[in-house]
């Protein structure tokens, strides 16, 4: 009997350790998920465009297919790669983050350029017109998953860099997996709500029993185009800001301290001039200057990618 009691006591102790480990994994995942906020916002802002032009009945299935592809990207491809990176090449995390930051700067600056020069979209529109709906849907989903892969890689690398270095490989894997699932469900759950909001608004406006319900429905329908435009603007700004911030911080980590020090000094001078809310002023000025850096880097990358890297990639594909 005493042996059984001792065994149960050992099992209880193991269970407590396991529970504490699970709590640690979830706690770490929740903590580091916020570090990837900029890329997550952009992911949520980018995805609704992939369901534009399709029948209402196809919107949620398209979002679900993209979400499944996103989970595959994060859990099957990127998580093992992140673990290998953390174990065998931790020195590569900062350069890879900077590479991802440069991509964010390029994407953000390209969106700004498309606003300035919308004629660039004309060829894409002509190609889309030549496809039937099934082909177009498949193409859109594949394109969305490819875009998600880049953003997911950046998100997973940011999460990895934010995790403590003294935790074990299994706790690292658990935190990455939990954060990946939380972020994916959050992003694509939000996207699902966004793309169906106008349908809900139409139903409320047409079938609502109360005048207030119908009025809210009409307001939702009228407000959605503006909301989607605002979401794209916020996502683009977040992309440029986070990309610039990553590169500025990366140069500091790699030994070039001037960009971060200059931005920090300017932020402190702004605090001295304003005289109130020093924390908020310092954050706003720092974020703005990081965004300026990101936009400048993106502006340099647009011609480099468009006229050098993309033609080279095309040559390799043909070869």
Image (cartoon, grey):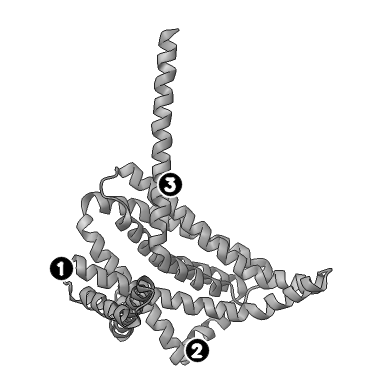
Mark-to-mark CA distance, 1 and 3: 33 Å
Residue at 48% across, 80% down: 233
Residue 249 in picture, x, y percent from top left = 26, 69
State the residue lying farthest toward the front. 275
Q: Which mark is residue 98?
A: none
Helix, strand or loop at label 2? It is: helix
Task: Kindly identify which residue carries mark 1.
Answer: 255
Number of the label disc, if any, that sits on residue 122 = 2
Pointer 1 with pointer 3, Cβ within 8 A:
no
Sequence order check: which comes first, mark 3 or mark 2? 3
At mark 3, the secondary structure is helix
Relative to residue 170, is residue 67 depicted above or below? below
Percent x, y of residue 137: 57, 70
First in sequence: mark 1 vs mark 2: 2
Residue highlighted by disc 3: 26
Q: Toward the viewer: 198 or 133?
A: 198
- Please name the residue shown 26% across and 73% down the image: 248
Q: Tell me which residue sits at (24%, 63%) in the image.
A: 94
**Residue 113 placement, left or right of 48:** left
């Amino acid at each position: 009997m005493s042996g059984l009691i001792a065994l149960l006591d050992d099992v209880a102790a193991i269970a407590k350790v396991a529970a504490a480990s699970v709590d640690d994994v979830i706690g770490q995942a929740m903590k580091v998920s916020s570090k990837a906020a900029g890329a997550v916002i952009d992911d949520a802002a980018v995805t609704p465009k992939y369901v534009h032009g399709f029948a209402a009945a196809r919107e949620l299935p398209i979002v679900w297919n993209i979400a499944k592809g996103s989970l595959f990207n994060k859990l099957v491809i990127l998580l093992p790669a992140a673990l290998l990176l953390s174990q065998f090449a931790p020195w590569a995390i900062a350069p890879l983050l900077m590479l991802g930051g440069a991509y964010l700067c390029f994407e953000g600056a390209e969106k700004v350029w498309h606003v300035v020069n919308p004629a660039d979209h004309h060829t894409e529109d002509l190609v889309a017109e030549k496809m039937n709906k099934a082909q177009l849907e498949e193409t859109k989903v594949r394109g969305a998953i490819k875009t998600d892969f880049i953003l997911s890689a950046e998100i997973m690398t940011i999460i990895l860099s934010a995790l403590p270095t003294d935790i074990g490989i299994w706790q690292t894997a658990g935190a990455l997996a939990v954060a990946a699932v939380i972020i994916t469900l959050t992003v694509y759950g939000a996207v699902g709500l966004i793309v169906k909001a106008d349908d809900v608004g139409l139903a409320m406006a047409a079938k609502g029993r109360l005048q207030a319900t119908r009025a809210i429905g009409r307001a939702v329908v009228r407000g959605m185009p503006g909301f989607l435009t605002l979401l794209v603007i916020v996502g683009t700004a977040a992309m440029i800001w986070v990309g610039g911030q990553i590169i500025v911080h990366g140069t500091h980590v790699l030994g070039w301290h001037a960009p971060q020090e200059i931005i920090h000094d300017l932020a402190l001078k702004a605090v001295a001039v304003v005289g109130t809310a020093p924390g908020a002023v310092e954050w706003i000025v720092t974020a703005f200057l990081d965004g300026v850096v990101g936009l400048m880097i993106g502006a340099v990358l647009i011609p480099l990618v468009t006229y050098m890297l993309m033609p080279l990639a095309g040559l390799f594909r043909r070869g």
